[in-house]
Amino acid sequence: EIKHGRISQLAFLGQITTRAGYHLPGAIDGAGDSFESFPNGFAAIGGPDSIPGAGTGQILFFIGALELFVMKDSANGAEPGEFVGDFR
């Protein structure tokens, strides 16, 4: 659960920074839409000005791939639940 706690902390910080008005520079897609043109929070997923469905699908696919192939509980031969570099 250490991994999920850290992901939750990153999600919270992302929410706070975007609501404070900080956005990534540049365009989010080939049409030239900027990051600032999309709303914050859940409205970015399911509102009238939300990210297109294909973009949401790409985000979910990327998160799923990270969960399955990169962020394993037993990385580098460690026992499940033992995270190398933890402060213990």
Image (tube, rainbow, N blue to C red):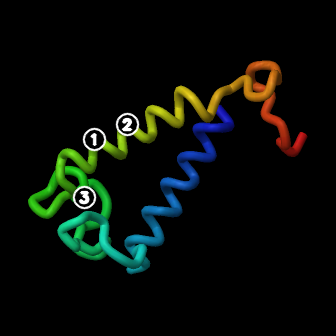
What residue lies at 47% left-to-right and 33% top-to-bottom? 65
* Real-space CA distance between mark 3 and mark 1, rounded to the nearest whole angstrom: 13 Å
Amino acid type, residue under disc 1 in the picture: Gly
Say which residue label 3 marks.
44
* Residue 17 placement (x, y as % from top left): 47, 71
Between residue 11 and residue 62, name the one nearer to us: 62
Q: Nearer the viewer, residue 24 or 14?
A: 24
Residues marked 1 and 2 touching at CB (< 8 Å): yes
User: Horizontal placement of 55 versus 18: left or right?
Assistant: left
x and y percentages locating residue 42 in the rendered image: 27, 54
Q: Residue at (24%, 52%) from the top-left corner?
A: 45
Above or below 73: residue 30: below
Q: In front here: 12 or 66? A: 66
Residue that numbered label 1 is attached to:
57
Mark earlier in primary sequence (3, 2): 3
In front: label 3 or label 2: 2
Structural distance between the alpha carbons of marks 3 and 2 = 17 Å
